[in-house]
DNA sequence: GCCAACGTTGGC
DNA sequence: GCCAACGTTGGC
C-alpha cells in the first residue's frame, strides 16, 4: 500500500467533478514527464491512497482524498493526432505514456494549503516543498497521517 | 502576467 | 555526451 500526491489544476479537473464518477482518468492522462510516468507505470497500485492537490490557483492546497482503482495502463491520448497530448513517438506497441484510474473517497474537512504544508517542519522533505513540479509524487506514511490530521480527519 | 526552476531537445 | 536554447510548470 502506497500513498501519493496527485496534482491537477481545478480548471482542468477539480476534486468536485470527481465526486459522481465511479472511476475516471481525465486529470492524469496527458502526464508527459518521465519521472511521473515511471510512478504511474511501475508503482501506483490498486488500493493506493491519493492526496488530491489543486495547483495553479491563488491558494494551492490538498483538498481531498482519492483511491486508485486501476493501475497503470497506456495513455491512448498519446496516439490520437487530434489530442493536445499527442506524442508522435508513441505507438500501440510502445505506448510511452501511462495513466491510472482513481475514485472519489472524501473531501478533507479543512483543506491543507501549500502554505500550511511549508510551515510544518515535518513535511519539509516533500517534493511539493522542494519546489518540484512533479505532478505524481510519493508520500510517506508519516506525511500522509500528518496531512490528514492537519485536514481535520484521521481516516480515509 | 511574471519569472524562477527545471525538464527536454538538438546541434556539435 | 555536453550544454545552450527552449518550453512548461506553478507559485506568487
Image (cartoon, coloured by chain):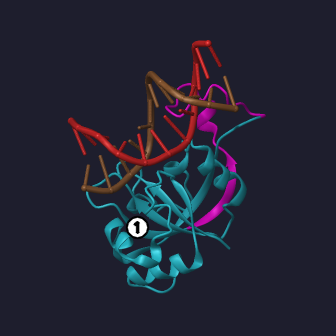
Chain colours: A cyan, B red, C brown
Relative to A141, say whether B3 is above or below. Answer: above
Q: Residue furthest right?
A: A93
Relative to A46, say whether A56 is above or below. Answer: above
Relative to A47, say whether C1 is above or below. Answer: above
Instruction: Residue A74: give x, y in percent of width and height.
Output: 68, 44
**Foreground residue among A98 and A20:** A98
- Classify mark 1: residues with Cα within 10 Å, few (<14), some (14-19) or many (20+): many
Q: Is residue A70 visible?
A: yes
Q: Chain of mark 1?
A: A
The quarter in which the N terminus of chain A is drawn is: bottom right
> Which residue is depicted at the point 38% across and 84% down?
A152
| Count of marks overlaid on the render | 1
Q: Is residue A156 visible?
A: no
Q: Magenta includes A78?
A: yes
**Foreground residue among A155 and A42:** A42
> Which residue is depicted at the point 40% across and 76% down?
A108
Q: Magenta includes A34?
A: no
Instruction: Residue A85: give x, y in percent of width and height.
Output: 53, 34
Relative to A11, say whether A119 is above or below. Answer: below
Instruction: Residue A67: give x, y in percent of width and height.
Output: 57, 68
**Circle 1 residue:** A62
The residue stretch that appears in magenta: A67-93
Query: Circle 1 sits in a helix, a strand or a loop, which is it?
Result: strand
> Which residue is depicted at the point 41% across and 58% down?
A17
Amino acid at each position: 500500500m502506497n500513498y501519493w500526491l496527485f496534482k491537477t489544476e481545478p480548471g482542468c479537473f477539480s476534486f468536485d467533478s470527481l465526486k459522481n464518477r465511479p472511476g475516471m482518468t481525465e486529470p492524469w492522462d496527458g502526464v508527459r514527464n518521465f519521472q511521473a510516468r515511471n510512478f504511474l507505470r511501475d508503482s501506483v497500485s490498486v488500493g493506493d491512497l491519493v492526496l488530491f492537490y489543486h495547483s495553479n490557483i491563488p491558494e494551492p492546497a490538498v483538498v481531498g482524498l482519492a483511491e486508485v482503482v486501476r493501475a497503470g495502463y497506456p495513455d491512448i491520448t498519446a496516439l490520437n493526432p487530434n489530442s493536445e497530448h499527442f506524442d508522435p513517438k508513441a505507438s500501440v506497441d510502445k505506448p510511452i505514456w501511462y495513466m491510472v484510474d482513481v475514485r472519489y473517497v472524501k473531501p478533507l474537512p479543512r483543506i491543507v494549503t501549500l502554505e500550511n504544508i511549508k510551515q510544518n517542519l515535518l513535511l519539509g522533505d516533500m517534493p511539493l516543498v522542494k519546489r518540484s513540479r512533479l505532478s505524481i509524487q510519493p508520500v510517506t506514511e508519516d506525511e500522509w497521517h500528518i496531512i490528514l490530521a492537519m485536514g481535520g480527519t484521521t481516516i480515509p
